[in-house]
Image (tube, rainbow, N blue to C red):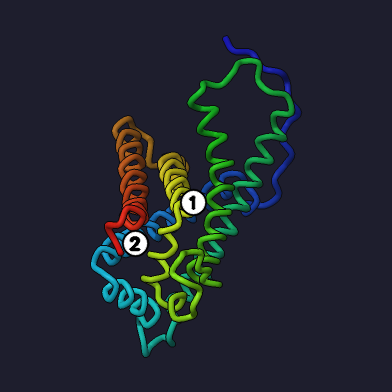
Amino acid sequence: MATRTLSAPPSKRTGKLGSTIFLKSLMAVTGILFVLFVIAHMYGNLYKLFAGHTAFNEYSEHLRTMFEPILPRHGFLTIMEVLLGIAVVLHVYSAVVLWARAKAARPQRYVVKKSVAQSFSSKWMRWGGVFLLLFIIWHLLEFTVVKINVGSGGQSAAITKDPYELTVHAFNVWWLTIIYVLAMIALGMHLHHGIWSASQTLGFTSTPRARSIAKTVGIVVALIVAVGFVIPPLAIAFGGIK
């Protein structure tokens, strides 16, 4: 029988909004929003980049003019950006608070060691999440906020205003492509574990069949998203998209 050292009782949580169950549910719901977004984002990039310069730029412009004249130009994207920004803040906040609580509840580690898989999964979700957050910040600066052109295609405003050219020039830079590929591998691993955790939190794993389905969905979605995101930059890097 595994033994563990005694730990101090966890401090009381005041209010339902500060409860562990609520924070886990908040992480699960915001995580689902991210999954839906990355699937749509991946599909648009994968399909339209291979369709060519005109098709990709028309797709980018369509996102800016979606639902006009009900919404102003860039209105839909602004709403999406605000909602996703709030979701990121809530997701990160919940993760930090839950991690701090778990650590405080076990000031001394269990004598029995966790399995290698459990230990790696737990650490990866934390540090992999930090890596993804930093990558998202850089990705927004490069392609949305500042539009940093690190490619060899020149620094002219004409190029940086062209979504297709900006993307192609960016992934002609080998080190940027490597960072992007690593980030997509990290995203796939995060999605794999995150979908499983969200399924548990929301009560979708109550039976063996449900657990099997949740695990399968996690693996399939993670692979589709990661591979779908990685194909375009690799195609650009090796000359398949010019």
Query: Would you name the residue on which mark 2 appears?
Result: 40
The N terminus: image quadrant: top right
Kindly identify the amino acid type of the residue bearing the numbered disc 2. Ala
- On the image, which quarter does residue 89 sit in? bottom right
Mark nearest the camera among 2 and 1 is 1
Q: Give me the residue at 53% from left, 40% from top.
A: 125
Q: Give me the residue at 51% from left, 61% from top.
A: 139
Left or right? Give the position of 13 relative to 33: right
Kindly identify the amino acid type of the residue bearing the numbered disc 1. Trp
Q: Reply above or below: 26 against 76.
A: above
> Pointer 2 and pointer 1: residues touching (CB < 8 Å)?
no
- On the image, which quarter does residue 204 sit in? top left
Residue 177 percent location from the top left of the image: 44, 53
Query: Would you name the residue on which mark 1 appears?
Result: 175
Disc 1 on helix, strand or loop?
Answer: helix
| Nearer to me, 173 or 16 | 173
